[in-house]
Image (tube, rainbow, N blue to C red):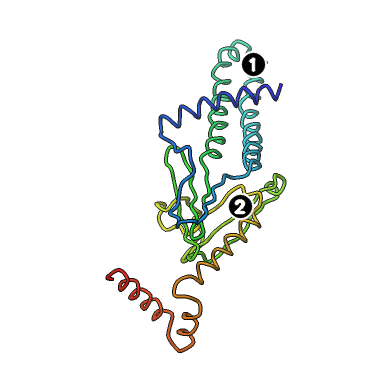
Amino acid sequence: MSQAVDRAAARFYEGFWGILTRWFIVPAEPPSLPVHEGEKMDSFRPSPGFLRYMKFKFWVVLTLIDVLIIVPWLILTIFKPLVGLVLAPIVLAIAFVPDIFAYLAIHLRYDTTWYVMTERSMRIRRGIWIINEITITFENIQNVTIKQGPLQRFFGISDIRVQTAGGGSGGHGHQHGAEAGFSHEGILEGIANAITIRDLILNRLKKSKSAGLGDEEHHRIIGSGWLAEHVAVLSEIRGLIRKLR
C-alpha cells in the first residue's frame, strides 16, 4: 500500500513539476560558471538522504498537527454526531490539503538545489518562485566547517558551511543568495561525502591563494620588506600595462 501511494505521488509530482518549470521558467539544468579552456566544472545536488531527512521531519510535524486537528473533531463527533458530520469536510480539508502542498514543497526544494564548483569558485542555487544564487570565490574563503546533528547522522548527511572574508553569523541567521544583503556564508546542505567536499574546497583554496604573481616572485618581494598592499598595487599596475599593450 505504501509503495503504491509513493508511486502515485511520484507520478503526480512529475506532472506538477513539469507545469511549474513551464510557468515559472525554472532552469532544468544546473547553473554555470566561467571556466578556462580545459578547466573542469562539477555540478551536483544534495544527497538523496537529504530528501529522506526532510520527509522524516515533515511526517513528524504533520502527524502532530493532524492529531491536534482530528482528535478534537472526533471527540466532538462522539458527543454531537450531527455537528461533527457537518464539520467533517472542513476538518479534513484543513488537516490534509496543506499536507499536499508541504509534500510538494519538499521535493521542489530538493530538485531546485544545485551546487557547482570549478577550480576557482563555487555557486549555490536554490528556489523556484524566487531563484537565489550565491557565488563564492575560493580565494575569499576564510573558514570551512562541517555541521552534523544526530538526525542528520542517521540519514548519513551533513551541512558544509563556507565563510568568506568579513563573514560570520552575526547572530541574525543566514540568508542564501548574494542579493540577501551582507551574508558572507554559503551552506551546502545535505552532503553525503562532506569530508571529501570540504577537503576539495580547501585544496582549491590553497591553489587560489598561491596563484597570481607567482610563488617565487611573491615570496622574494615579501621577504625584501614589501608589504602585502604594495604587492597588490604592483599586481594591479602590471595588469593595466598588459591591457595597454
Amino acid type, residue under disc 2 in the picture: Asp
Q: Which residue is mark 1?
A: 77
Q: Residue at x 62, y 39 (%)?
A: 51
SS of the residue at dot 2? strand
Q: Residue furthest top?
A: 82
Q: Residue furthest bottom?
A: 224
Q: Which residue is mark 2?
A: 159
Provide residue 173's location: percent of width, then percent of height.
Answer: 51, 54
Provide residue 231's location: percent of width, then percent of height.
Answer: 41, 79
Report the quarter where the C terminus lies.
bottom left
Amino acid type, residue under disc 1 in the picture: Thr
Residue 226 left/right relative to 244: right
SS of the residue at dot 1? helix
Could you classify mark 1 by the number of other residues whose Cα lies within 10 Å: few (under 14), some (14-19), or many (20 or more)?
some
Q: Nearer the viewer, residue 120 or 70?
A: 120
Q: Nearer the viewer, residue 245 or 199?
A: 245
**Mark found first going from the N terminus, 1 or 2:** 1
Q: Is residue 16 above or below residue 172?
A: above
Q: Nearer the viewer, mark 1 or mark 2?
A: 2
Q: Is residue 1 above or below residue 31?
A: above
Q: How many marks?
A: 2
Q: Residue at x 50, y 67 (%)?
A: 208
Quarter of the figure with residue 45:
top right
